[in-house]
Image (cartoon, helix red, strand yellow):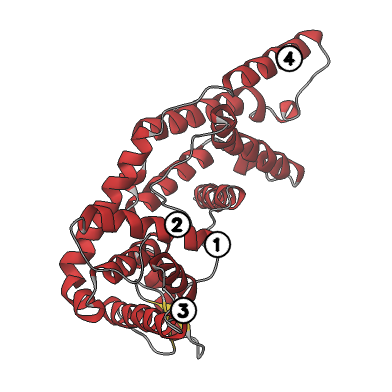
Amino acid sequence: MDIFFVQITFGVVLFFLINWIGKHSYSIGYRGISIFVKAEEAPALNFLIRVLTPIVYLIIISSALYYFNLDKYVTNIYLVNIYYIIFRLLFNLVTSRGKLLDWYRQALYWSTIIIISYFVYDKIIRIKENILPDFTTIANELWIIILIFIFQLTNNIRFSQDGTVRRKENYLKSRYRHFNNLYGELIKDITKNEALESVAYSILIYEDFNRPKVIRLIENIKHRFSDKSHTLGVMQVKSDKLINDRESIMLGTTKIVNSCDRYIKENSVDGEKVYEWNVINSIIADYNVGSEYLYEVNELSYEIRKIFYPNSKDSLGFVE
C-alpha cells in the first residue's frame, strides 16, 4: 500500500513540475485563453517535451530510489506516469477546461507516454544495472544522429490552428452563457452600458478560468485560518472577510465601473477626446497588473462584444 501512495505522490508532483516547466503553474500566474491563437512554432519540440518529460522524470526518480536502496518503490514505477495522466485528466474536467482540449491530440500524447513508460521500465529501469544508458557502440551513436535528423525535419511541420480557435470560441460562449444566466441581471444593473458589460464579462471569465471553483474553495479554507485580506470569489476581489461568488461579482463589477468613471473624469479636460481603447486598457490594468493579463482580457472583451453585442450602440469613449 505504501508503494501505491508513494507512486501516486510522484505522479502529482510530475503534474505540477510540468506545469512549472511550461510556465503555467497555478500558484505563480495566469494561463491565457486568447481567441487569437498563434501558429505552433515547433510542433515536434512541443511533442517531445510533453511526451519525454514524464519519461526522463521516471528515469531520474528511479535512479534516486535505487541510490537510496529503496528498490521496492521502483517496482512497476511506470504506473507513476499513468497516475499523472489520470490526475491531469481529472484536473481539466474539474476546472471545466474540457472544451478547450483537443482530445485526439491528448489521447495521442497520453497513449504514447504510457507505451514508452512501460517499454523504458521493462527494458531499462527494471534491471538496476541498466539504469544508465550505454553509448559504447557505434550503432547507438548512428541512431542518435538519425533521430536528431528526423527531429529537425519534423520540427518544421506546421499544423492548422482552426480546431484550437473553434474550441476556445465554444468555451467562451459556454462560460458567457453560464455567467449570464446566473448573474446577467446583476451585471447589467451595475454597468448600465453594454460596452462596459463586455469588459466585466471578460474579466469574470478570465479570472474564473485561472481560479476555478475547486481552487476558490481552497482559497476560502485558507482565508478562514488567516487574518489577512485575500482575493476571493469568482472575480478575485480583495476582501478581509469571506465572500461568495455573487458578492465577488458585485464588488468586482462596481470596481470596474468606478475605474471607468475615474479615468473618463480625469482625462476629459479641455475638450480632449477620450478614446475607448484607452478607457478599456485603463480598466483592465487597474483591475490586475501584467501585460499578458491586459492583452488577454482585452481580446476576450473584443470577442464578447462582437459575438454577444453586435448591434450595441453603447461605447466608453471616442472610437476611431
Image-quadrant location for residue 46: top right
Instruction: Using the rendered image of the protein, determine whether residue 102 is visible from the camera's viewpoint.
Output: no
Secondary element type, mark 1 = helix
Figure check: 313 above or below 84: below
Is residue 284 rendered to the left or right of residue 163?
A: right
Q: Are marks 3 and 1 in contact (CB under 8 Å)?
A: no
Name the residue that disc number 4 marks: 145
Pointer 1: what residue?
291
Which is more N-terminal, label 2 or label 4?
Answer: 4
On residue 138, which mark appears?
none
Mark 1 and mark 2 residues within 8 Å of each other at the beta carbon: no
Please rate how many residues cluster around mark 1, counting C-alpha atoms within 10 Å: few if below 14, some from 14 to 19, many from 20.
few
Image location (x, y in percent) of residue 140: 75, 13
Q: Which badge, 1 or 2, comes first in the chain's sequence? A: 1
Q: Nearer the viewer, residue 92 or 74?
A: 92
Q: Position of residue 134 (x, y in %)?
A: 78, 20
Task: Kindly report the distance in space between the C-alpha atoms of the residues bearing marks 2 and 3.
Answer: 28 Å
Mark nearest the camera among 4 and 2 is 2
Horizontally, residue 287 falls left or right of residue 120, namely: left
Query: Tag 4, which secondary structure?
Result: helix
User: How far apart, in angstroms, are the residues tagged by discs 4 and 3?
Assistant: 52 Å
Q: CA distance from mark 1 to mark 2?
A: 9 Å
* 68 sits left or right of 2 in the view: right
Q: Which residue is disc 3 drawn over?
A: 222
The residue depicted at 41 percent of the width and 61 percent of the height is 297
Name the element at disc 3: helix
Q: Amino acid at mark 4?
A: Ile
Question: How busy is the neighbourhood of tag 3: few (under 14 within 10 Å), some, or many (20 plus)?
Answer: few
Seen from the viewer's position, the closer of residues 304 and 235 is 304
| Picture residue at 59% right of the left edge, 50% below the top | 17
Q: Earlier in the sequence, mark 3 or mark 1?
A: 3
**Mark 4 against mark 3, which lies toward the viewer?**
4
